[in-house]
Image (cartoon, helix red, strand yellow):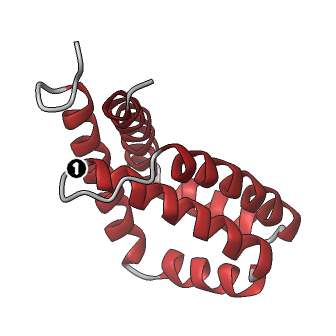
Amino acid sequence: MCTSCISVFLAQLIGIYLFIVSLAMLVHQQRYKKVMTDFLANPALISLSGGLGVIIGLLIVLCHNIWISDWPVLVTLIGWFILLQGIARIFFTGRFIKAMKDIMTKSCYLIWCWVWLLLGLYLIWVGFGSNGYMH
């Protein structure tokens, strides 16, 4: 598969995912804050999700480690973010829990939701739009 095809596919996949999840987190804030509180109370789930994050992050980083000054670098940065967050969940579970609790109790929750929503929309635009979609 060509590099630009992988970029477009990952932009579409990650963009749709970010849009759906962040929109749900904005629409159902109380429910998702409760879900996160329950999740953070279970270190086993955090470690499991960390392992999944390492796998997904590695998949993205290994097949899409593209450092150019154009939109595909966002896919690479997201892959590295997922990988590093997965590693943090496995090796620094306590710090991860504290950081996430801080985010959940402050206005950071809404800011992160909007950042991920807008990033998702941008990736959908470049992934399906005339700039990114390969015919």
Q: Is 96 above or below relative to 77?
A: below
99 on left or right of 120: right
Q: Position of residue 128 (x, y in %)?
A: 23, 25
Label 1 Cα crowd, 10 Å radius (few <14 / some 14-19 / many 20+):
some
- Give whichever of 66, 72 is nearer the camera: 66
Q: Is 116 above or below relative to 109?
A: above
Query: Amino acid under label 1?
Result: Trp
What residue do we see at 69% from left, 87% from top?
95
Q: Which residue is mark 1?
A: 71
- Give whichever of 127, 46 is nearer the camera: 127
Q: Quadrant of residue 132?
A: top left
Q: Quadrant of residue 35?
A: bottom right
Q: Is 112 above or below relative to 103?
A: above
Q: Residue furthest right?
A: 44
Q: Residue furthest left?
A: 130
- Give whichever of 27, 50 is nearer the camera: 50
56 on left or right of 30: right
- Which quadrant holds the N terminus? top left
What residue do we see at 54% from left, 85% from top?
102
- Give whichever of 22, 78 is nearer the camera: 78
What is the secondary structure assignment of the residue under circle 1?
loop
Q: Position of residue 52 (x, y in %)?
A: 73, 51
What residue do we see at 50% from left, 63% from top?
80
Q: Position of residue 4 (x, y in %)?
A: 31, 33
How many numbered marks, from 0 up? 1
60 on left or right of 97: left
Q: Position of residue 74 (x, y in %)?
A: 32, 55
What residue do we see at 42% from left, 38% from top?
20
- Which quadrant holds the C terminus? top left
Q: Residue furthest top?
A: 135
